[in-house]
Image (cartoon, coloured by chain):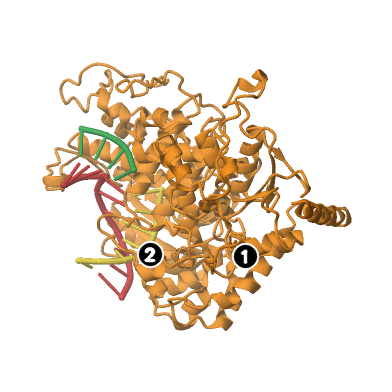
Chain colours: A orange, B red, C yellow, D green
Amino acid sequence: MATEDAALKVKVARFEELYALDDSQDDEPDEGLLQSMAMLKRKRSEKSEPLAQTSSSSMTAISKRDRDAPEIPAKLQKLSRTTSAPPSLISPHKTASSRQLRRTSTLPKSVVTTTPTSDPADVAPKPAKLFSGLHFYFFPNNLKNPGRKFRIQKAEEYGAKWEQAFSATVTHIVVDRSMNYDQILQYLRLDAIPQQNIHVVDERYPADCISFRSIVDAGQRQYYIKGYKPQQVSEPTVIPRADSLQLKPAGRAVQTREPQTLSQRTTTTLSDPSPVKPASMATTVEDPSPGKRALEPSDSSLSAGWERPGPREQIVLSYCFGTDSRQLIDDDDDQGTTSTATTGTNLLDLGSSTVVPKWQQRFQCMQQNTGKNEDSPNAETIALLQEMAEYYTQIKDEWRPIAYRKAIATLRKHPVKVTTKEAAEKLPFIGERLAAKIEEITFAGFLQRLQSAREEPADQVLQLFLKVYGIGYAKGMRLVAQGYKTLEDLRTKADLDQNQKIGLEHFDDFNTRVPRLEVKQHSDLVAKAAKNLNEGIQVYTMGSYRRGAESTGDIDLVITHANWPMTRLRVMVIDSLVPQLFKQGFLKCALAATSRQDGSKWHGASCLPGSNVWRRIDFLLVPAEELGAALIYFTGNDIFNRSMRLLASKKGMRLNQRGLYKDVMRGKSREKLTEGELVEGRDEKKIFAILGVPWREPWERIC
DNA sequence: CGGCCGTACTG
DNA sequence: CAGTACG
DNA sequence: GCCG
């Protein structure tokens, strides 16, 4: 006992020396170093990668390349940890006691229940300072990782002292999931950590305490650190941690993901889970997550075409929880049409009061969505859910992302921070599962589910491959299954079609966002060439540019002519404009071209004179009669479009990029049986009006 | 339990 | 046809 | 994922 104590003091003294000598270290020191240490250690245990090939040479070659590529958003790092939901967080109240009993074998002392003490002063917000008197040292002990940062803040909020340096006063070392026991010892230069004085716990420990509202037994196995072997016990090896979350199969359809591939135990592996560069992940979706990169590229460069949004937007406060009064009131300026029963199908009668049935208020397109959540009290939650949605999107889960985005939309509109699942579940589009996640987020600051999934090496490889234009989920999975791990592998060995080869070749370019200003330049250049061929041709800059984005994933242009029919326009574009632009050296390649017989879209790549960066560019050819519908389609965003289209279908109509049709016959599962009769295609505003959707400026269509 | 947007181009 | 893409 |  006494000896232990003495020993500890010695060690501590050594730290203090250490820190004194090298304080540069205490701020975000390690990750790099620890990582590399970790890698050394792992090296050997890396063996059983299910995927063959793994030419180790390409491995290294690539991981370099990966870093250059715009890629795995750094935000992915934020989440931590691996296990599938700790039962604790799911149903704390019920399990609390039983759970602690379960583990009594270790350190009996710990189950100190909520300190009833604490001064009345802090009763205010959360439960009174749960962690009062405790001194937490985190490992790594910095705020670099968003997930950890959140945990630290949370711990402090609950009264813990966050120790900047390791010292004798530390009561708990809270260790990131990515770290193992040896790393702690090495970093702290200890031979062992005296368990009597200091609890070494897994990163989820604080969250569990919070959710139990008590200081739970820190000695429980689920808080063991990787590589920690309980003293006198046999049980060798790493604690198997009932980890390995099994990803739910994507959809009913998509079922299993090669179990051997993806659910392979992780206990690390993966070459370098660490410093991923931010960089936006372009691909499909536009403006990534407003929540995170909120700061925006800022100012300047706006000028261009359409007016940019203004910081208007007020939160609808008239929101109620009641199970029924869920539809927000469209407090909104323009047609404040709420009310009344829908009478006839007087669709075309725009002028008069548009009648909007109540159920319709639920549609996303009925709201002004600016896609911002800066000032939402739920911003944190939203950001994480957004990542989940993105994750499921990439994984080709068809429907979860939709559910997530609906939930996000309601959170965005909710004026009050939602912390408990009970509260959450009362909100529209938030069910039991999402409610639980929301609670988890607010208590733990992260979703382990996401983290663990993202840490799967195979998943990361898949993520990478999916960023190659032309490679989707099916192809990506095949490539992963074939053992390819790097872009270099793909380039040299994989069987790719023409577009995929181009996508690979220009991986970096295509995954780099295009500054608003440059979008304008491409657009102007095309417009100029077009005017040169015929004065009547008009070019509109669409996509997220029209929605006011500071940068876009690609360049979307509508090409139209006031009097020409589609056929003539198409021939002009295919036979003259495109070749001309190729000749100028502006267009670099075609990825999907309309035949001169029919079709309306042209996809390819363009490059400004003097530049060598290829941009994805899309043309949509539109006859004047369809311009309105095309504007809606090409302005998006995708969610807004789906919402409008679904709404139309619920009204027996059909909306596509060419127009709004009525009297569409649909069979089972809304299957289209009839084309329907064209109602409106030319005028964007009329289409809104006919559908009973209040006019939404482009920047209000960010759902 | 079935539905969750509607389309265009590639191979 | 499935796959990928577009908003 | 959620909803009817």
Q: Which of the 4 image quadrants contains residue A206?
A: top right
User: Which residue position holds label 2?
Assistant: A472
Chain to which mark 2 belongs: A
Quarter of the image that includes the C terminus of chain A: top left
How far apart are the alpha carbons under marks 2 and 1?
29 Å
Question: Mark 2 is on which residue type?
Answer: Gly
Q: Position of residue A701 (x, y in %)?
A: 42, 37
Q: Closer to the camera, A295 or A624?
A: A295
Q: Earlier in the sequence, mark 2 or mark 1?
A: 2
Q: Position of residue A413 (x, y in %)?
A: 45, 29
Q: Position of residue A372 (x, y in %)?
A: 52, 36
Secondary structure category for the residue under label 2:
loop
User: Which residue position holds label 1?
Assistant: A611
The answer to whether one can see residue A154 in this image is: yes
Q: Residues within 10 Å of mark 2 (few under 14, many from 20)?
A: some
The answer as to whether the residues below labels 2 and 1 share one chain is yes
